[in-house]
Each structure stands twice: as structure tokens, then as C-alpha cells.
């Protein structure tokens, strides 16, 4: 019997727990958490995903009954590809989605016999449990499985290419100055941990996952005594969002907090219990806060939309907005900028035009 796999801790960094994994033929560290309890839970999830990937690799094509590509084969092969080419969080999410879908449709079902009608039935049966946004995301995962199946040569056509998806429930907007002031007043009665997280995203434009992931090792100080900046910086391939390097400029309260915690081991922003923020914990806090301040559709990404719109209102050069927001192109500006909400500002600019 083999030795039990356990999380390991780096001697030089007591808040860094990891395990060894094989990545494209190389043995590399896989980060599990900043304490042993979280690391053990993360390791269980990782081992489950590795088991799924292992089954897909060991399943010979000749063992498919009658040459039929079953949903079991297609999903396992797809998840094996995700395990090798995408982040662990993406794999965990898609394992959960496809496990539900394959269980509902039948593991031995011919993958090419699934029709848009079947997906519509699957969504309808869960109408009370899933929001429109969740259902839309789940359908996208199933479609991605079929697209990858074609690229990997498992199937020759995509029977679910055209599927009507439910409308997303999320309404993207920028807070008005009055709403921002209302939030600031309400935050004074919240615990300091949520206030720090909220202001960090509002004052820097950081993505929620960037705020959750930033650690003391990511803090950089540039400039001199007369002109200096405190930054959060991830090297290429290390940022929470993707392969590209990411730099976030801090200001106001967040700059002061960053300066004070620059030598912190582990995460800068934590929950009341001392654990780093999780996506679900942040989502639930925003749900409660949304009810408190009476601002419909306020979610964790709203501060980032507000930050971008403030940059536009301040007439910051679009190329600088691109850098501050961490985009690879300006195509995202219409999504995050909401100048159409502030018609008085647009009207003032319109009147200044020399026709």
C-alpha cells in the first residue's frame, strides 16, 4: 500500500502549503492554501479531479461499445484536457457541472444523440434551483465539452451548437456618487475585514479574485520620497486572471493598508476568522450588504465597474485605462464603462464641442 499523500509546508514560508503534481512532464508545486486544514480540503478536491483525468487517459477507444462515444467518455476526456490546460478552480467548477449533466442524461448515452431539446429539459427541471446566470454558465460548459470533443477528434459534429440560453440575471452598472456615499456610511457599521475588501476593489479597480489572491510577496514600492507608489504585481503566468503580468496601483486607504502589510506572509485581505476570502464568502457578504444599502444588483464586480467609469469621467486616456484595468485590449471598455448612466456629464461635454 502506498504512502498517504499529505500537504507539505515550505520551511521558509509557513503560510504556503502545497503538494507536488506533474505538469507537462515536469514536477511542480501546486498551492493548496495558507494553513493545514484548508490545504487538506484542497488536496481532496485535487485528488478527485486527478482520478477523473486518470480514468480518461486509461480508457481505450476500442472499449467503447460499438464505437459509440458515450457521455462518460466525452466528459472524462474533456476534463482530462481541462486538468492539463486550465486552472484548478476551472477544473473543479466544470467537474461539478458535468457530473450533474452526465448523471441526468445517462453515462452510457451516445454523446451525439443529445439535442438542444434535452438541454432545455435539463434546465427546466432545475428552474427553481438555478438562476438564469447559473443555467447559462452550465450550458456553456456542456457546449465547451462538445467543441473540445471535435478538436480532439472524438466526435465529428456538435449537436448542441445552437442552444437558447436563459438571460443572465446580472445587471452591470457603476454606482452613482450618492450610492457610493451610502455604501461608505454603511461600511462604518460593518466589520473592518469586509470594509477593507470593498474599498480595495473600489479604489484600485482590482478584480475580486485579485483582491482575494494578493499576498505580501506581490507588494512592490517604486519611486522616491517625493513621488512613490505602492503596487500589487504578479509576474506573467502567476496572476489570478491569466498568463499575462498584472500590476495594480493602490491609492487612499488601500495604499496605506498595503504599505503597512507589505511584509505580511500570506494574504493581505482576510475574513474575520483570519482565513483568506473565498469567492463564495465574498458573494454572500455582498448579498447581505446589498439588502442593507438598498442598491439592487450590487455584486463583487460592481466596484470595478465603478472604478472604470470614474476614470472615464476624469477623462483619463483610454490607453492608460487599459493598463489600470489590466486588459489586453480596449474591447472591454464598453462593458465596464457606464458613461451612459451619467447623462449630465455627457451633456456638458457635448456643449463644449466646437461645431
Image: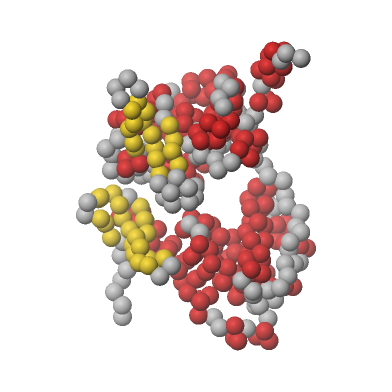
Q: Looking at the figure, which quarter contains the C terminus?
A: top right
Q: Position of residue 233 (x, y in %)?
A: 39, 40
- Colour style of the rendered protein structure: secondary structure
Q: Position of residue 96 (x, y in %)?
A: 55, 61
Counting labels gives: 0
From this viewpoint, is residue 175 visible? Answer: no
Residue depicted at 51% across the width and 76% down the height: 57
Left or right, 277 with respect to 329, comes to left
Left or right, 66 with respect to 186, comes to right
Q: Position of residue 166 (x, y in %)?
A: 72, 49
Q: Position of residue 45 (x, y in %)?
A: 44, 62
Residue depicted at 72% across the width and 67% down the height: 158
Using the rendered view, name the quadrant where residue 314 is placed.
top right
Residue depicted at 49% across the width and 29% down the height: 202
Residue 26, relative to residue 162: is it above or below? below
From this viewpoint, is residue 137 visible? Answer: yes
In the image as oriented, which residue stretches furthest toward the front? 355
Using the rendered view, name the quadrant where residue 246 is placed.
top left
Q: Looking at the figure, which quarter contains the N terminus?
A: bottom left
Using the rendered view, name the quadrant where residue 142 is placed.
bottom right
Amino acid at each position: 500500500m502506498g504512502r498517504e499523500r499529505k500537504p507539505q509546508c515550505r520551511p521558509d514560508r509557513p503560510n504556503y502549503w502545497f503538494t507536488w503534481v506533474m505538469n507537462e512532464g515536469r514536477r511542480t508545486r501546486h498551492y493548496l492554501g495558507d494553513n493545514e486544514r484548508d490545504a487538506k480540503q484542497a488536496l481532496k478536491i485535487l485528488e478527485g479531479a486527478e482520478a477523473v483525468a486518470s480514468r480518461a487517459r486509461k480508457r481505450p477507444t476500442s472499449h467503447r461499445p460499438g464505437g459509440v462515444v458515450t457521455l462518460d467518455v466525452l466528459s472524462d476526456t474533456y476534463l482530462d484536457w481541462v486538468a492539463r490546460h486550465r486552472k484548478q478552480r476551472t477544473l473543479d467548477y466544470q467537474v461539478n457541472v458535468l457530473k450533474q449533466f452526465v448523471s441526468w442524461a445517462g453515462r452510457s448515452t451516445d454523446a451525439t444523440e443529445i439535442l438542444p431539446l434535452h438541454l432545455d429539459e435539463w434546465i427546466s427541471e432545475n428552474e427553481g434551483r438555478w438562476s438564469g446566470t447559473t443555467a447559462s454558465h452550465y450550458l456553456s460548459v456542456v457546449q465547451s465539452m462538445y467543441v473540445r470533443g471535435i478538436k480532439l477528434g472524438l466526435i465529428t459534429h456538435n449537436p448542441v451548437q445552437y442552444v437558447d440560453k436563459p438571460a443572465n440575471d446580472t445587471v452591470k452598472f457603476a454606482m452613482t456618487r450618492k450610492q457610493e456615499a451610502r455604501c461608505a456610511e454603511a461600511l462604518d457599521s460593518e466589520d473592518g475585514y469586509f470594509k477593507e475588501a470593498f474599498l480595495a476593489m473600489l479604489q484600485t479597480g482590482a478584480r475580486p479574485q485579485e483582491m482575494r489572491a494578493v499576498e505580501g510577496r506581490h507588494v512592490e514600492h517604486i519611486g522616491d520620497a517625493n513621488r512613490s507608489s505602492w503596487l500589487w504585481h504578479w509576474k506573467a503566468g502567476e496572476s489570478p486572471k491569466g498568463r499575462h503580468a498584472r500590476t495594480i496601483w493602490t491609492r487612499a486607504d488601500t495604499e496605506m493598508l498595503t504599505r503597512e502589510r507589505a511584509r505580511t506572509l500570506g494574504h493581505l485581505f482576510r475574513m474575520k476568522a483570519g482565513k483568506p476570502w473565498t469567492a463564495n464568502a465574498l458573494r454572500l457578504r455582498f448579498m447581505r450588504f446589498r439588502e442593507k444599502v438598498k442598491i439592487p444588483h450590487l455584486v463583487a464586480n460592481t466596484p470595478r465597474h465603478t472604478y472604470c467609469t470614474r476614470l472615464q469621467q476624469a477623462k483619463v486616456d483610454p490607453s492608460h485605462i487599459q493598463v489600470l484595468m489590466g486588459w489586453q485590449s480596449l474591447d472591454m471598455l464598453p462593458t465596464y464603462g457606464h458613461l451612459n448612466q451619467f447623462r449630465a456629464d455627457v451633456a456638458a461635454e457635448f456643449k463644449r464641442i466646437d461645431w
